[in-house]
DNA sequence: TCAAAAGTGTTAGTTTTACACCCATGA
DNA sequence: TCATGGGTGTAAAACTAACACTTTTGA
């Protein structure tokens, strides 16, 4: 190839987790190499010559934080000159969802530390990672308006109130419990179980539901309009 | 920078035009250099070291086809190894909309020819450009469900039927004229003019409308739910 | 028996859908 | 005067929004 081009390519992952008690969190790692040594940053790194972009993100996520993820979509490519002090570096950012209770975070060789941070309370970040997270948060906040959301974020079986809280968090306003249930049940994505939540706090124990995966993924693919 | 990485970065543009009579068309150029010499392909090319991705697409579009565009959004980044026979080349694809009647296509130095092709009738394409166009068409087909569409595609002043035909093309089914008008007028994005369409064919001449740009761009930013 | 959270229906208002006749123009 | 396409309203049905009392449990 005769082209002279001095651009390097990286990938970064914005992985969101949801805890009904805490809200929406994002996975950050603490850098062990300059630039931005010891700063918090998104997991990510250089793409190898023979791996796909998806393989690169998955690999970096696993080696830097121990998180193995099954939902990842491409978010946006950030390519402004000057976004990295080392030179011209273009980064393809990915957007992931996980249930954080399924993992023990394991900072490994490439990262000093890996932690969940509430998106309302982020530390100073390396590079333009704050911007990338902003874009990802917007994407998340739009996503649930045209596809179902929750499968990757909640436990396998969950009380309907957890799903409702997720939607309240995304909408950033209270939702009427009865109308929400009508709407969600009408979508047909929930399966009711004859089990009740083990008591964690006071009050009447809630019935548990899970997602009807076939219908959930069908709606995810086809799209829908969710308005509440 | 110590990293050894042998990946090159290109940009490609999927520019859609709309002609009420013909439907939705995409701008293609005929290649003057190998690989895929003389094949039809998307306008695009290598990113220069000191330009942003947007600058790169705009430049390539203008030099290859003479199209100067004012609506461009990033579409997706295609990075599978093997998508380009010259080596590992990652391409950031952009999505653009123009009114094709505003331009004379001018194939220049870098392209043998530049032409509009109906998206239902594409020639064989270079690289993975057919896939890229597929992704762009999906994007276009989703776009009008959550933002207004038409401003970049139609004439400044247009009969409401042109807008309706655009939506029918995107939805790929007929729309009730009266309900469509109610819906669109209710959005408040149209300004009625006291002018009538110059006769092009038979029948009663239509009133002309234009977009209320302030309101149009407000809805575009905020999003909306369009269902008809 | 009290406090906490879950379960559950009805009504008014709004939105959506389906549907057909008359009007202005050029041929 | 005919053919073509444009302009326009109403009624039934579906959906959305607002609202409060009862039940189950643990403390």
Image: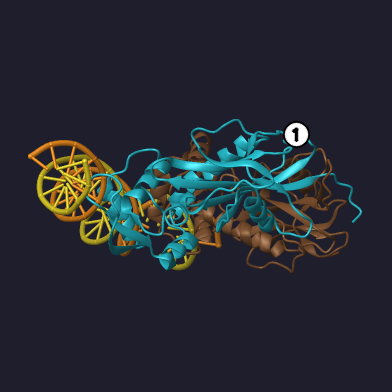
Chain colours: A cyan, B brown, C orange, D yellow
Q: Is residue D8 left or right of residue A151?
A: left
Q: Is residue B162 left or right of residue B80?
A: left
Which residue lies under the disc numbered 1? A82
- Residue lying at 30% horizontally and 63% vertically, measured from the top left: A192
In this rendering, the answer to whether C1 lies above or below B161 is above
Q: Mark 1 lies on which chain?
A: A
| SS at circle 1 | loop
Estimate the x, y position of residue B26 in percent, counting from the top left.
68, 58
- Residue lying at 28% horizontally and 61% vertically, measured from the top left: A195
Q: Residue furthest top?
A: A124
Estimate the x, y position of residue A167 in percent, counting from the top left.
39, 46
In this rendering, the answer to whether A37 lies above or below C14 is above
Badge count = 1
**Neighbourhood count class around disc 1 (C-alpha, 10 Å): few under 14, some 14–19, many 20 upward:** some
Return the residue nearer the eye: A134 or A221. A134
Q: Is residue B48 left or right of residue B147?
A: right
- Residue lying at 62% horizontally and 57% vertically, measured from the top left: B136
Return the residue nearer the eye: B88 or A112. A112
Residue B44, visible in the rendered structure:
yes
Look at the image and tell me in which quarter the N terminus of chain B lies.
Answer: top right
- Residue lying at 43% horizontally and 65% vertically, measured from the top left: A213
Estimate the x, y position of residue A111 in percent, counting from the top left.
66, 43
């Amino acid at each position: 190839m005769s082209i002279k081009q001095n651009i390097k390519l990286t990938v970064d992952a914005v992985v969101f987790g949801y805890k009904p008690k805490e809200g929406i969190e994002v996975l950050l790692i603490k850098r062990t190499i300059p630039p931005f040594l010891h700063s918090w940053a998104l997991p990510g790194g250089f793409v190898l010559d023979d791996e796909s972009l998806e393989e690169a993100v998955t690999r970096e996520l696993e080696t830097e934080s121990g998180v193995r993820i099954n939902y990842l979509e491409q978010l946006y490519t950030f390519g402004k000159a000057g976004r990295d002090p080392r030179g011209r570096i273009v980064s393809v950012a990915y957007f992931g969802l996980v249930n954080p209770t399924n993992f023990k975070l394991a900072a490994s060789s490439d990262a000093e530390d890996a932690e969940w941070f509430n998106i309302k309370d982020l530390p100073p970040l390396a590079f333009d990672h704050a911007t990338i997270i902003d874009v990802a948060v917007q994407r998340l906040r739009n996503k649930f308006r045209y596809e179902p959301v929750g499968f990757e974020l909640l436990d396998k079986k969950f009380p309907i109130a957890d799903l409702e809280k997720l939607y309240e968090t995304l909408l950033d306003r209270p939702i009427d419990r009865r109308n929400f249930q009508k709407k969600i049940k009408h979508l047909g994505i929930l399966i009711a179980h004859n089990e009740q939540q083990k008591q964690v706090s006071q009050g009447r124990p809630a019935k548990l539901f899970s997602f009807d995966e076939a219908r959930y993924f069908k709606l995810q693919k086809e799209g829908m309009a969710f308005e509440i």
